[in-house]
């Protein structure tokens, strides 16, 4: 695997990592920089801390960054690194170039989600400032702003996305260079969507477009953001295919041997929120994942069969 850097990435990494050459000629400084860059290409390139590094996305991000030759620290409360209490945070961030935050609130309700993202992000950004971290990467969702305004904060998913929007605001207001990755919904979350939308023996879904993606592709997008130059903005990623919401859910249920009937209902809500036709799909210019739905479904069925 080629771990070479393009010119912008090289300037960023060199500025963060090359030792200062005191009283050296330009040629000597250039030679020292070249030798150091080559050593780093052959060794560990950066120390990267992954907050939420033991979860569905975080564990995949850790694996991909480690495979890329980086020194990766997975961080979670059970590993002694807690962004709410601050336990172990300063030690984990010492010497880190990049912090990736893919942690999630233990609750989708408005008040606990707002408290979690507010306290966790505030503590994390403060610790990053002290440690001199040069790039903060956070995972969020396509349609965060629209969803935060799509229903009552206390009774619908709008409250959770309002908390995510508040988290993004904290990141943007900090002095730390950042990249916010907006991903579409995960294939792995389809059952939860179906369960929430179930009415008797039927699943009622809004008449909207849907472009979900595999968790592995989400992790790839986050990994690429982490090793790249800070965007100081939002980058969007989505699945390689776009569907009618109800049609995709029928395919999912069929592949899962689920007998429930799927109905397309103009009055149906998404976890209580009112959707526009394109709320759940990325805009033009978004990066697209590689794993197609049918391939993911086959892989998931095979994994379930092995687990039985």
Image (tube, rainbow, N blue to C red):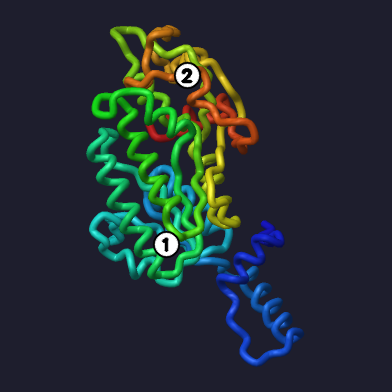
Residue 72 lies, with reference to residue 111, above or below; the image says below
Identify the residue shown where x is 65% and y is 66%: 11
The residue where tag 1 is placed is 73
- Residue 13, how many percent across, how many down? 60, 67
Count of number-bearing discs: 2
Which quarter of the figure has residue 8?
bottom right
- Residue 291, how many percent across, how many down? 59, 33
Residue 239 lies, with reference to residue 87, above or below; the image says above
- Residue 98, how many percent across, how many down? 48, 61
Identify the residue shown where x is 51% and y is 34%: 214
**Within-10-Å neighbours for mark 1: few <14, some 14–19, many 20+:** some
The residue where tag 2 is placed is 276
Identify the residue shown where x is 45% and y is 69%: 132
Task: Give me the C-alpha separation between circle 1 and circle 2.
Answer: 40 Å
- Residue 258, how many percent across, how many down? 39, 15
Question: Outermost residue toward the front?
Answer: 173
> Considering the numbered disc 1 on the image, is that residue within a helix, a strand or a loop?
strand
Identify the residue shown where x is 34% and y is 52%: 121
Residue 100 lies, with reference to residue 181, above or below; the image says below
> Considering the numbered disc 2 on the image, is that residue within a helix, a strand or a loop?
loop
Question: Outermost residue toward the bottom?
Answer: 23
Camera-side residue of 300 and 170 = 170
Does residue 6 appear anywhere in the picture? yes
Which quarter of the figure has residue 112?
top left
Does residue 305 appear anywhere in the picture? no
Decide if residue 116 is on the left or right side of residue 185: left
Residue 281 lies, with reference to residue 226, above or below; the image says above
Where residue 240 is drawn, which disc sits there? none
Counting residues from the N terminus, which is met first, the one under dot 1 or under dot 2?
Answer: 1
**Within-10-Å neighbours for mark 2: few <14, some 14–19, many 20+:** some
């Amino acid at each position: 695997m080629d771990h070479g850097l393009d010119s912008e990435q090289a300037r960023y990494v060199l500025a963060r990592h090359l030792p200062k050459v005191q009283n050296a000629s330009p040629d000597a400084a250039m030679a020292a920089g070249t030798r150091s860059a080559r050593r780093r290409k052959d060794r560990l390139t950066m120390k990267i801390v992954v907050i939420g590094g033991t979860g569905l996305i975080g564990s995949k991000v850790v694996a991909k960054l480690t495979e890329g030759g980086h020194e990766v620290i997975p961080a979670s409360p059970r590993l002694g690194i807690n962004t709410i209490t601050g336990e172990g945070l300063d030690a984990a961030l010492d010497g880190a170039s990049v912090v990736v935050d893919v942690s999630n609130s233990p609750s989708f309700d408005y008040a606990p989600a707002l408290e979690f993202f507010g306290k966790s992000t505030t503590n994390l950004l403060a610790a990053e400032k002290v440690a001199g971290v040069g790039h903060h990467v956070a995972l969020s969702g396509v349609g965060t702003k629209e969803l935060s305004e799509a229903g009552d904060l206390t009774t619908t998913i709008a409250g959770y996305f309002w908390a995510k929007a508040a988290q993004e605001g904290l990141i943007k207001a900090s002095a730390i260079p950042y990249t916010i990755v907006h991903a579409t919904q995960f294939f792995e979350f389809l059952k939860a969507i179906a369960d929430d939308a179930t009415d008797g023996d039927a699943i009622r879904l809004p008449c909207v477009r849907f472009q979900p993606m595999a968790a592995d592709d989400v992790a790839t997008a986050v990994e690429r953001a982490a090793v790249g130059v800070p965007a100081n903005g939002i980058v969007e990623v989505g699945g390689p295919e776009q569907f009618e919401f109800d049609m995709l859910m029928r395919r999912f249920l069929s592949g899962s041997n689920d007998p429930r009937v799927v109905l397309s209902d103009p009055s149906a809500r998404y976890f209580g929120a009112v959707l526009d036709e394109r709320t759940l799909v990325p805009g033009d210019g978004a990066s697209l994942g590689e794993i197609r739905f049918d391939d993911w479904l086959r892989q998931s069925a095979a994994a379930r069969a092995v687990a039985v």
